Image (tube, rainbow, N blue to C red):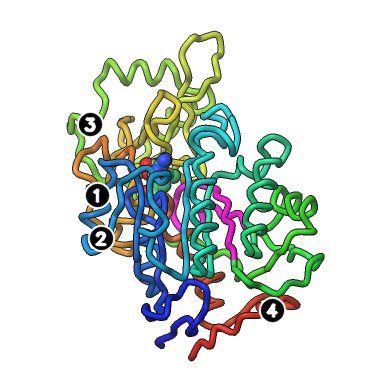
Amino acid sequence: MTTSLPEGSPGQRPDQPASRRFLEFFSGIGLVHAALAPLGWSCAFANDNDAKKAVTYQKNFPGVTLDQRDIREVPVEEIPTADLATASFPCIDLSQAGGRRGIHAEHSGIVWSFLEHIDSLDREGRAPKFLLLENVPGLLTLHGGSSIDVLLHEVARLGYAFDLVQVDARHFIPQARNRVFIIAVKNAELATGAEMPDTHIRRYKVREVFERNRHLPWVFFDFPSLPARSVSLDDVLLDIPKGDPRWWSAERMKYFWDHLEKDHHTRLTELLHSRTVTQFTAMRRGRRRGLREQIFNLRNDGLASCLRTPKGGSSIQFVVRVGGGEVEVRRITAIESGRLQGVGLSTHNPGYVFPESEQDGLFGFGDAVCVPAVQWVFEHSIQSYVDNSRLQTPLQLTMDLGVAV
Ligand SMILES: C[S@@+](CC[C@H](N)C(=O)[O-])C[C@H]1O[C@@H](n2cnc3c(N)ncnc32)[C@H](O)[C@@H]1O
């Protein structure tokens, strides 16, 4: 099925045939790209000022113009015309770990530069028809909700109506990674005040945002139920042989046992002599129990915790293997981190080229998006709309995309 945006739609110059082109801001190691390319979208321009991530991006997507300047230094005339702009902008100021400084702080505040570019493109009559923004759930609640409110107001001021959903990667991959997506459509005709559908991806904090901002232009895409996950933690974890130096020494294992949460100590001891090998992920948490050091906590739900850039003790994730009379512990690898973001598995983007070093991989994947989660959100919103002009009633977009299906 070939479809295209109509002649003369926003996001199209007369000299450029419209064809599902996107601008990938904050492109990192390209996992938004990896999500959209299989759906038929081609990247017209990417931007990220991290030189190490750029190496990985270019290896995976050699044909794409990757601009490595600070987004603030990119002149609008160098940004090509496209149908969609994506922004998985820095989360550090929106998360607990980063001090919750807010949407105007140094790092996360860079989203305003993205929106300034959209504004400039609009003034040239070539604003993208769609925007896709992604960030952490802290965005919904930060500073009494004012961070998300001000962001949505700006998106609305730029002429977009939007949906807001919260999706956890655990429905696709064994990683607990809850993320918020703003999916925006330009020139939509609105039924303001329409009810937000009571679906699993729009509950609690998302609904509170809607209640506070009913007066803004909302559109509600028709998402299906979240799928049942088919990938297990065992599918993701490498089978690293006993004796490999990545497994901890006896001395470090003593430290591990001494700093293991009491209940988890009991659980591992129970599993120790089982013939079956069981694998867990673990993190160090700040529970003190009279100790100065953090203690190790095992996850018992078959998931990895949310990957983060490994900058400090509590952001590093470990693998614990128990059974057959042994307990072994090691740090999670870059390959496993990539798999937890949905690349490098036989079922998920097997051809993705990984960052060259272990450290670059841990940093790149810790900061990236989960490919199948982004793909699911995109497929059932923008992609579905372009394919079928399908929005949840009673909302209709004024613009007929003239899509041939
Ligand atoms: C959350 S990460 C995005 C990850 C990306 N989507 C991926 O899949 O790898 C945010 C990105 O914003 C980039 N960034 C931060 N400040 C920037 C700026 N001023 N100009 C350009 N890129 C910036 C960082 O280098 C980082 O890669």
Q: Quadrant of residue 344?
A: bottom left
Point 21% across, 60% down: residue: 62
Instruction: Check disc 1 and give the amino acid type.
Output: Thr
Q: Which mark is residue 374?
A: none
Q: Mark 2 or 3 closer to N-term?
A: 2
User: Of discs 1 and 3, which sits in the foreground?
Assistant: 1
Q: Bounds of the magenta span?
A: 165-184
Q: Mark 1 or 3 closer to N-term?
A: 1
216 magenta-colored: no
Where is residue 25 shown, x and y percent of the image? 41, 53
- Between the residue at mark 2 and the residue at mark 3, the CA separation in whole angstroms equals 31 Å
Relative side of 9 to 346, left or right = right
Q: Mark 1 or 2 closer to N-term?
A: 1
Q: Is residue 231 visible?
A: no
Asked if 44 appears above or below 149 in the picture, the reply is: below
Point 32% across, 38% down: residue: 362
- Between the residue at mark 4 and the residue at mark 3, the CA separation in whole angstroms equals 56 Å
Q: Which mark is residue 61?
A: 2
Most distant residue in the bottom direction: 404
Residue wearing tag 3 = 246
Instruction: Check disc 2 and give the amino acid type.
Output: Phe
Instruction: Check disc 4 and give the amino acid type.
Output: Gln
Residue wearing tag 4 = 396
Q: Which mark is residue 56?
A: 1
- Between the residue at mark 1 and the residue at mark 3, the CA separation in whole angstroms equals 24 Å
